[in-house]
Image (cartoon, rainbow, N blue to C red):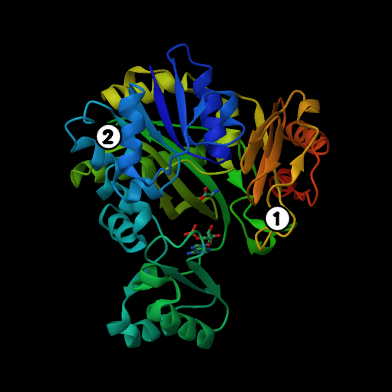
Amino acid sequence: MNILLLGSGGREHALAWKMRQSKALSQLFVAPGNAGTASLGVNVAVDPNNFAAIKDVALKNAIDMVAVGPEEPLVRGIFDYFANDDALKHIPVIGPSQKGAMLEGSKDFAKQFMAKYGIPTARYKSFTRGSVADGFAFLESLRPPYVLKADGLAAGKGVLILDSLSEAKAQLEEMLNGMFGEASRTVVVEEFLSGVELSVFALSDGKSYKILPEAKDYKRIGEGDTGPNTGGMGSVSPVPFATPEFMEKVRTRIVEPTIRGLRAEQITYRGFIFFGLISVGGEPMVIEYNVRMGDPETESVMLRLDADLVDLLDGVAKGNLSERTCRNLPQAAASVVCVSGGYPGAYKKGIAISGLEKVQGCIAFHAGTKANGANIETAGGRVLVLSSLADTLPQALEKSYAEAAKVEYEGKYFRRDIGKDVLAVGK
Ligand code: AMP
Ligand code: GLY
């Protein structure tokens, strides 16, 4: 099978790495890919949101399946674009239809869906410019801190958490007045949930589903979860507090009602579903849906996935996922992200990376890298993800940290406390 994978981050390198292990994979193309994916397949310099260009790549290379890494092409309707084009409709796209992608593309849609299907989530109301007075009244009925969410995609920046009521009101007004452009024309205001977060992933063919290894990611730039949000500074899997009892609650209260709800709404969904969850006193609740895999969770999840990924995706495409085998390895995985100096603010690109050849017993997934002749250079904020698998989480962390120390580039930074919180809880 020839596969075209869309995206260019560590997530896509990890997916490509896992696909490469399958006997069912013939040629792999990655659009646009990075220096890591170039070692596993052919990078094609095409923007995943340029569907006409993706069509050309797919037809020219006899592609049998398109797997979509990031959310944007899905929210823009790449699934429907293929399904409605006579030349493309024989090529399955792994991902939801445009309607299904609204679970991530519209927080208001996602909240209505959860309310309708009884899926536990924070109490909420949605507001537009015309209903700002109601928004103020709703804020007054809540206890601090206050959670404001832009309805649409806002590059991961659309959620504000505010301590004071007056600030929450002011920010609500600013959001409705276009703080995040179109994305915040509608704003979801919701109750603050206090607990520990984790990411649960399912793969579905629209009828059945497989739950993949769960993971926890670390979003803030600073140790102890301080400073601004980033695209993710590390991940671990498994998550110690996600006990079998907890995961059973996730399955019956969240995953199954979601799949049932999608079917009831006649929404075509053949792809990954990412449940951003919070455990509130041991009870799982949904913070958000994403319609793709998480980054940097995927790097840890793929290490623990005891399955042939291409076979699973083929099951998704053919609608017989229930016949495919999917297990989790008992070992632990840890991923440490090395970023550019200054990230998530301004940072330099094009800095030479050395020491990659010294990395052993650990995978250096590439996130923001680019080949320049024989050399590899930085090309983004998140540069490399060092991912290890070991018998225990402390061992996996130790290995990833030891190998992260071997890679060098000017300005390299990584958090030294990945996984520390979950290990402390177990003590
Ligand atoms: P989201 O973009 O929806 O994932 O929100 C970004 C982050 O804001 C989440 O990962 C949580 O840490 C936090 N967050 C979002 N909604 C809530 C909530 N209702 N209660 C507490 N924290 C939240
Ligand atoms: N790690 C969170 C995300 O991918 O959105």
Callout 1 amino acid: Lys
Which residue position is annotated with label 1?
348
Nearer to the camera, 258 or 178: 178
The percent coordinates of residue 390 (x first, y second) are 71, 26
In terms of secondary structure, where does tag 2 sit? Answer: loop
Residue 297 visible in this rendered orientation of the protein? yes
Indicate whether 350 appears above or below 186. above
Q: Name the outermost residue toward the front.
A: 373
Residue 214 visible in this rendered orientation of the protein? no
Q: Quadrant of residue 260?
A: top left
The percent coordinates of residue 234 (x first, y second) are 66, 45
**Residue ID at (57%, 28%):** 38
The percent coordinates of residue 238 (x first, y second) are 61, 35
**Residue ID at (28%, 40%):** 79
Q: Name the outermost residue toward the top.
A: 23
Indicate whether 159 appears above or below 379. below
User: The C terminus lies in which quarter of the figure?
Assistant: top right
Alpha-carbon span between mark 2 and mark 1: 43 Å
Is disc 2 in contact with disc 1, using a CB cutoff of under 8 Å?
no
The percent coordinates of residue 211 (x first, y second) are 44, 33
Mark 1 packing: few (<14 Cα in 10 Å), some, or many (20+)?
A: some
Callout 2 amino acid: Gly
Mark before the other along the chain sequence, 2 or 1: 2
In terms of secondary structure, where does tag 1 sit? Answer: loop
In this rendering, which labeled residue sits more in front, label 2 or label 1? Answer: 1
Which residue position is annotated with label 2?
206
Q: Would you say the beta carbon of the disc 2 residue lies within 8 angstroms of ligand 2?
A: no
Nearer to the camera, 209 or 53: 53
Q: Quadrant of residue 196?
A: bottom right
Indicate whether 25 appears above or below 221. above
Residue 243 numbered mark, or none:
none
Is 296 left, or right, of 91 in this rendering?
Answer: right
